[in-house]
Image (cartoon, rainbow, N blue to C red):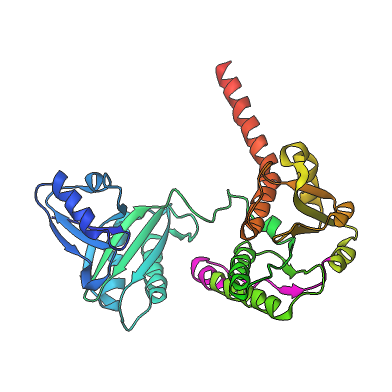
């Protein structure tokens, strides 16, 4: 009998089983073992992995190589069997998913089991891009071991340019959204999430004139709520340290005065500006060269026209369109990132074209 752990979105377990019944004759299954949604355990007389993967609701299939009682010593002692599937010249990583309360943690398993496998195989540990991954799926009473090739699609690899190269230099200057207090807070939340999501160097809330203090207070409350909600997600999702983006308040005109210094780049987003396609070569150079990039975003009304004289660039992100206030930061930063990396894409394309021409010859 061959056993599989199928992972799907919560609530899709029955859909997966019903689809399997249409394409497979005989198999046993457990839906949501120990009450954990998003999991189906399937057992069959034959190898049915390819058939399982024909079901769109299936996100991942792990073929079970070994199973044992959920006991720390028994789990790590499986290294004696796992070693036969990892060669000395390969790299590996151990990934443990623990469900329920046990007297050990996922980290404990990763460290001890990983160390035992390393000692038995002389293989190297590579947590970023391993050749093999040992999956330890821990349930209340049973633990299952699966061994798969390293992921084809990794979030964080050396081959991908790190977007933080650009965003850590960017200061976003955001005019506050003022008016009805509930609306101020809602827009503030969206702006706080966006600024933290891109991990910019600083978010400056910049009114252009005297404003209602309580409306501004609600907007800033929203910024804090949105920022912290995104920050908590980042802490869980990223394998590295994340910091809260500094949030300050300053008069819009004074920001321009302070930031007009050497090695700074001032960018205003406005429909009156230039299309990115017309300025991307010069903008690419400046984005790479300048130490700090200041991006001004309007709110309800745009950045005052008098400030256009002091900007290095006035950019129209989407000709004949205007963005909603909460979309200004993501739209601007994604557009700038696209410019920042476009030379790399061009070089890669040119290299591929040259190689193709050589092959043709």
Q: Which residue is drawn at 42% across and 72% down?
A: 111
Q: In which quarter of the image is residue 86?
A: bottom left
Magenta run includes residue 301: no
Task: Tell me if residue 105 comes above or below residue 132 in the rendering.
Answer: below
Task: Tell me if residue 40 comes above or below residue 204 in the rendering.
Answer: above
Closer to the camera in the image, 183 or 361: 183
Find residue 330 and report its horizontal and vertical position in percent: 63, 56
Find residue 98 and report its horizontal and vertical position in percent: 33, 73
- Give the quadrant of the N terminus: bottom left
Q: Which residue is drawn at 26% across and 78% down?
A: 71
Closer to the camera in the image, 162 or 18: 18
Q: Residue furthest front?
A: 180
Find residue 16 and report its horizontal and vertical position in percent: 23, 54
Q: Residue at x 17, y 52 (%)?
A: 18
52 left or right of 126? left
- Give the quadrant of the C terminus: top right
Find residue 153 and report its horizontal and vertical position in percent: 46, 50
Task: Tell me if residue 51 comes above or below residue 60 in the rendering.
Answer: above
Q: Can I make out residue 32 in this image?
A: yes
User: From which residue to which does the magenta span run?
Assistant: 231-252
Q: Which residue lies furthest to the left in this view?
A: 26
Task: Tell me if residue 291 comes above or below residue 211 in the rendering.
Answer: above
Q: Which residue lies furthest to the bottom in this view?
A: 103
96 left or right of 24? right
Q: Which residue is drawn at 67% across and 75% down?
A: 220
Q: Can I make out residue 64 in this image?
A: no
Q: Quadrant of residue 135?
A: bottom left
Closer to the camera in the image, 24 or 204: 204
Magenta run includes residue 239: yes
Q: Which residue lies furthest to the top in this view?
A: 361
């Amino acid at each position: 009998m061959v056993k599989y752990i199928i992972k799907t979105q919560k609530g899709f377990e029955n859909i997966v089983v019903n689809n399997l019944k249409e394409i497979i004759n005989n198999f046993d299954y457990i839906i949501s073992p120990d009450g954990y949604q998003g999991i189906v355990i399937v057992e069959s007389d034959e190898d049915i992995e390819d058939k399982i993967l024909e079901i769109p609701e299936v996100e991942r299939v792990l073929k079970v190589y070994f199973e044992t009682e959920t006991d720390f010593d028994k789990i790590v002692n499986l290294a004696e069997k796992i070693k036969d599937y990892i060669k000395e010249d390969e790299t590996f990583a151990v990934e443990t998913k623990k469900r329920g309360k046990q007297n050990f943690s996922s980290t404990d398993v990763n460290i001890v089991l990983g160390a035992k496998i390393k000692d038995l195989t002389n293989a190297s540990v590579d947590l970023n891009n391993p050749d093999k991954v040992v999956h330890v799926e821990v349930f209340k009473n049973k633990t299952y071991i699966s061994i798969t090739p390293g992921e084809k699609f990794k979030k964080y690899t050396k081959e991908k340019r790190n977007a933080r190269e650009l965003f850590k230099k960017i200061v976003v200057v955001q005019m506050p959204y003022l008016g009805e207090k509930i609306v101020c807070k809602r827009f503030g939340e969206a702006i706080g999430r966006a600024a933290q999501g891109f991990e910019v160097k600083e978010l400056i809330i910049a009114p252009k004139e005297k404003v209602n203090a309580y409306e501004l207070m609600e907007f800033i409350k929203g910024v804090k709520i949105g920022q912290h909600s995104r920050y908590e997600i980042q802490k869980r999702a990223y394998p590295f340290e994340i910091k809260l983006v500094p949030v300050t308040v300053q008069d819009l005109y004074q920001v321009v005065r302070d930031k007009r210094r050497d090695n700074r780049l001032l960018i205003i987003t406005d429909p009156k500006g230039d299309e990115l396609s017309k300025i991307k070569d010069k903008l690419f150079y400046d984005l790479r060269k300048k130490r700090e990039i200041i991006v001004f975003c309007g709110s309800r009304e745009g950045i005052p026209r008098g400030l256009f004289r002091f900007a290095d660039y006035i950019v129209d992100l989407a000709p004949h369109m205007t963005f909603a206030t909460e979309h200004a930061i993501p739209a601007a930063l994604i557009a700038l990132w696209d410019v920042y990396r476009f030379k790399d894409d061009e070089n890669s394309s040119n290299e591929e074209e040259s190689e193709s021409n050589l092959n043709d010859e």
